[in-house]
Amino acid sequence: MLKPEIEDGQASLADPQFRADVLAGLARRPRAIPARWFYDHRGSELFEDITDLPEYYPTRTEVALLESLCPELHQLTGEGRAVVEFGSGSSTKTPTLLKCVKPSAYVPIDISGDFLRESSRTLSAAFPDLLVLPFEADFTRTLTLPHTIKDAPKLGFFPGSTIGNLIPLAAVDLLRAMRGSLGEGAMLLIGMDRIKDEAVLVPAYDDSQGVTAAFNLNLLERINRELAGTIPVDAFRHRAIWNDDRARIEMHLEATRNVSFTVEGRAFDVEAGETIHTENSHKYGPRDARILLRSGGWTPIREWTDDEGKFAVILAEA
Ligand code: AVJ
């Protein structure tokens, strides 16, 4: 029997959850699509570019912190834990951690499979004796980790303030899920971005080179590519706003004129000035961070910040 040829492969290979989230998100008011869908291959590349921007302080601040906390962390965690990284992306911060924790195994978890395999190969080359077990999964669920590391105590690693993408209810659920996935005796090393001046926060999410704009707009391109969309991407512009009440940066895509388009054959009309909410990036004061961790079942035992208090890395135990 002949199988039907898949033309380009795109539309029919789309993730059913992506399809469902986009169709529901465009239909609801306010329109909103979860931030996790930014990270197709192009989106992951654009995010890497963001981390090098002069305005985007979190990555370089956190990397410097990780380097300086290393000896103390080594003492607190001991050697031989299995490091489980949630949303590992390109694993750029991982070598710094692996050098001081000397783990028995490394399990990077990410939803972007291509990127995950690519970065796992690079990491294996740099740490030839390390057991690297890439795991393609949505880490917001409780996961059954590879059997090989069943008996090793775990160190969860959740850098970058990725937790900030979640509203508090979902953040607490995730912390609890991590506790469930990592098991007895686990520790968690988590990065959280601090509340600071709007004049620093907004440019970090609306840079002068337009890389963050391209990252945001790539979501529409991805919808067009993978869900047979006809969105006129040039009719949308990137917006980053500080929502002080909720202590978060919000990213939106604002229609600059009335537009009509289809996604998977479904019709949508967006009026000029209307936005699609694409990301939240919550910021936490010192006490906020600790309450969040405790709500998720984790006891903070040590925290590190840079001199200006821009970013925090916190070690907690289950
Ligand atoms: C990867 C979620 C930590 O919120 O700062 C960067 C994503 N969005 N610029 C963040 C992001 C726009 C980033 N996180």
Image: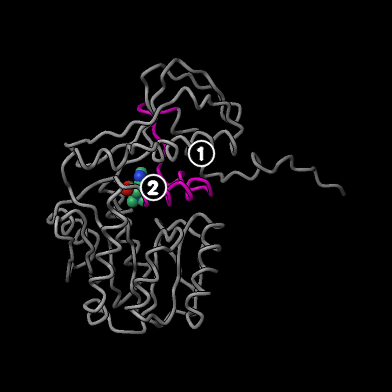
Residue 213 higher or lower than 269, as above or below: below
Left or right relative to 186: residue 300:
left
Rate crowding at label 1 as few (under 14), some (14 to 19) or many (20 or more) other CA atoms within 10 Å: few
Q: Is mark 1 within 8 Å of ligand 1?
A: no
Q: Which circle marks residue 20 in the picture?
A: 1
Q: Residue at x 22, y 35 (%)?
A: 243
Please state which amino acid type lies under the numbered disc 1.
Ala
Q: In which quadrant of the rendered image does the C terminus lie?
A: bottom left
Secondary element type, mark 2: helix
Residue 173 higher or lower than 282, as above or below: below
Please state which amino acid type lies under the numbered disc 2.
Ile
Tag nearer the camera, 2 or 1: 2
Image x and y of residue 145, in percent? 45, 71
Report the residue that reaches farthest toward the right.
Answer: 1
Circles 2, 1 touching at the beta carbon (< 8 Å): no
Q: Residue at x 39, y 71 (%)?
A: 95
**Residue 301 lies in the magenta stretch:** no
Residues in magenta, as a range: 27-52
**Residue 37 lies in the magenta stretch:** yes
Image x and y of residue 107, in percent? 45, 70
Q: Residue at x 47, y 78 (%)?
A: 127
Q: Nearer the viewer, residue 24 or 136?
A: 136
Q: Is mark 2 within 8 Å of ligand 1?
A: yes
Q: Which residue is mark 2?
A: 50
Left or right relative to 84: residue 312:
left
Image x and y of residue 32, in percent? 39, 34
